[in-house]
Amino acid sequence: MAEQKTNNRILIHILVWIAITGVLFLQSYLDRGEIPLRLPVLHALTICIFYVNFSFLVPYFLLKKKVLIYISSVIILLSIAVTANKLIPFNKPPEPFEENIDIKNEISLFKNDKPIAFDIKKPPRKNGFFNFDLIFPLFFNLPFIVIGTTMKMYDEWNKNERKKQEIETKNKTTELHYLKHQLNPHFLFNSLNSIYSLTSKKSSDAPEAVIMLSELMRYMLYKTDNDFVMLKDELDYIQNYLKLQRLRIAKNENITINIHGSVARQKIRPLLLISFIENAFKHGTNFMGDTEVKILITIDGNNLHFQCINLIGNKKKDKENSGIGLANTKERLELLYPNKHNLIVKEENNKFMVELNLILA
């Protein structure tokens, strides 16, 4: 990819120089009927000056804050252009410009009727400081120096921006891995607590719960390493998690999940919704043992609406770790779905509600 970009850039440079050269030569030919001797030489020198500035002076002096050295070097380059313009003839040396005019009249105004010879010569060229030999190379080369400097500085800025984005991406990836690995044990501890509750009651559902947990862990270990998972797989995972919770909880008639809409080929970031559901089960049982967790998921094309409502039954339980899952999910949403999600978390009428609108991939 990098080699292809380099080749494309070289090709663009060649085409641009061919176009500039063609325009200069054509204009000169139309103006004078010929191409002056000095034009191709001075144009080749201009190309050399452009690339000396572009490839050497800007990166090694200007971008390294050696401004005085850079300015001095540019002045030297322009001096070379002025000197070359002075030394190289404009065209073939002209023939001596001399014209003899014979004036003869029948009535002679001059003695002895001798012809008068007028010697007309080209007036001497003024050699002032600001003459054509100085002004032309300056005004011809300066724009190319400015363009080359601007291009190189833009390239450097662009390269720094790409590096900055790469660093930010690496930092985000590292942070996401940290959050995900922090989430997995959190889920495992909660699930083991559920199974422990079943075994302590000597429930016949304990073996089924172990199998259910193994299915959940298989999904987490082998599918969630990808950046995206199929939405259908993530919803199956959530439904299996609810089955596990229903096995644990005796009064489970108020544990419901409703999924509406068409699930086709949509994708979602893995384990994004489970923390809200875990939090609901952790705090959704009151002192009488009643549990209420109601989940509603609506899919409309690439738009997902998630709502989870639970009782506020136990605020003190596992106070130290209770916020880990929710905090992690909020951070992941900010990192993975910037400007593509809307999260509302609120408490009212002794109920805790999470509402998430998400634009899927």
Image (cartoon, rainbow, N blue to C red):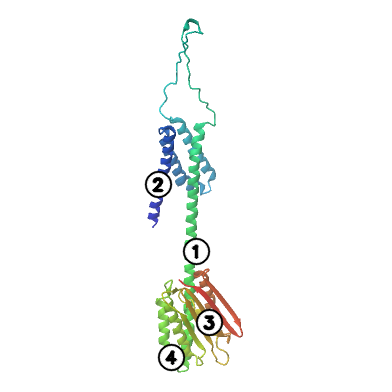
Q: Residue 130: x and y, percent?
A: 54, 32
The residue sitting at the right extreme is 349
Residue at x 46% of width, y 88% of height: 195
Which circle's residue, 3 or 1, is located before the other in the chain? 1
Residue bearing the label numbered 2: 15
Residue type for callout 1: Glu
Q: Could you tell me if the residues under marks 4 and 2 are in contact, i.e. CB atoms within 8 Å?
A: no
Residue type for callout 4: Ala
Which circle's residue, 3 or 4, is located before the other in the chain? 4
Question: Mark on residue 308?
Answer: 3
Q: Residue 226: x and y, percent?
A: 42, 72
Q: Give the Cα separation between the discs numbered 2 and 3.
A: 62 Å
Q: Residue 159: x and y, percent?
A: 47, 55
Looking at the rendered image, the quarter that the C terminus falls into is bottom left
The answer to whether 68 is drawn above or below residue 329 in the figure is above
Residue bearing the label numbered 4: 206
Residue bearing the label numbered 1: 168
